[in-house]
Amino acid sequence: MSIIAYHGSTEIVRRPVCLLGRPNLDFGQGFYLTDRKEQAIRWAQSVAIRRKAEPLVNIYRLERETILAEARCKVFGAYDSEWLDFIVDSRSGKNPAASYDYIEGGIANDRVIDTVNLYIAKLITAEKALERLAQCRPNNQICLLNQCITDKYLAYERTEPAY
């Protein structure tokens, strides 16, 4: 079963390239998507302001269930201690994503990253960080880390203005 997935940008991305992603992001260096159109629109608008360009949303069909059955996957269901440790390790350059083809879970966006940064700086404990994170409703991000998986199971459909 496939899902519709979105990538907010200022560019049309017909053929995503996983290695063009920045290192040390939440789920590693890969191609990031979401199954929430509003989230992709917000991201596109944010990027467009910085780049002084038009915000766009690239729309894809993602064979999620097939990927979950065939690839090396990690799915985080909540902002929990496992997610927190993974994000901290990723942002510290330890690359915990190296053993996966596909990672899905909450995004460390503005309201969440402040808590993560306080924890990294040892200004709050893991327990306090998790307590604060429990108050946040997770957004969802999908990171494709394997180019073969991406080419096989992600199909570009169209691009729309992100308004």
Image (cartoon, grey):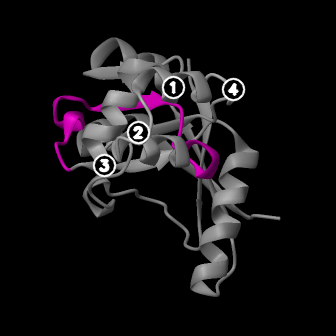
Between marks 1 and 4 in the image, the one whose residue lies nearer the viewer: 1
On residue 135, the disc is 4
Tell me residue 59's x, y (percent).
Answer: 63, 50
Is 51 placed left or right of 94 in the picture? right
**Three-letter residue code for mark 3:** Arg
Write down the residue under mark 1.
Answer: 128
Between marks 4 and 2 in the image, the one whose residue lies nearer the viewer: 2
In the image, residue 131 above or below residue 155: above
- Indicate which disc, 2 or 1, sits on the residue closer to the N terminus: 2
**Three-letter residue code for mark 4:** Gln
In the image, residue 30 above or below residue 143: below
Q: Secondary structure at mark 3?
A: helix
Between marks 3 and 2 in the image, the one whose residue lies nearer the viewer: 2
Q: Secondary structure at mark 4?
A: loop
- Indicate which disc, 4 or 3, sits on the residue closer to the N terminus: 3
On residue 91, the disc is 3
Q: Determine the image quadrant of residue 49.
A: bottom right
Between marks 1 and 3 in the image, the one whose residue lies nearer the viewer: 1
At a point 41% along the width and 58% down the height, the residue shown is: 15
Q: CB atoms at circles 1 and 3 under 8 Å apart?
A: no
Mark 2–mark 1 Cα distance, whole angstroms, equals 9 Å
Q: Determine the image quadrant of residue 61.
A: top right
- Indicate which disc, 1 or 4, sits on the residue closer to the N terminus: 1
Q: CB atoms at circles 4 and 3 under 8 Å apart?
A: no
At a point 45% along the width and 45% down the height, the residue shown is: 118
- Indicate which disc, 3 or 2, sits on the residue closer to the N terminus: 3
Q: Secondary structure at mark 1?
A: helix
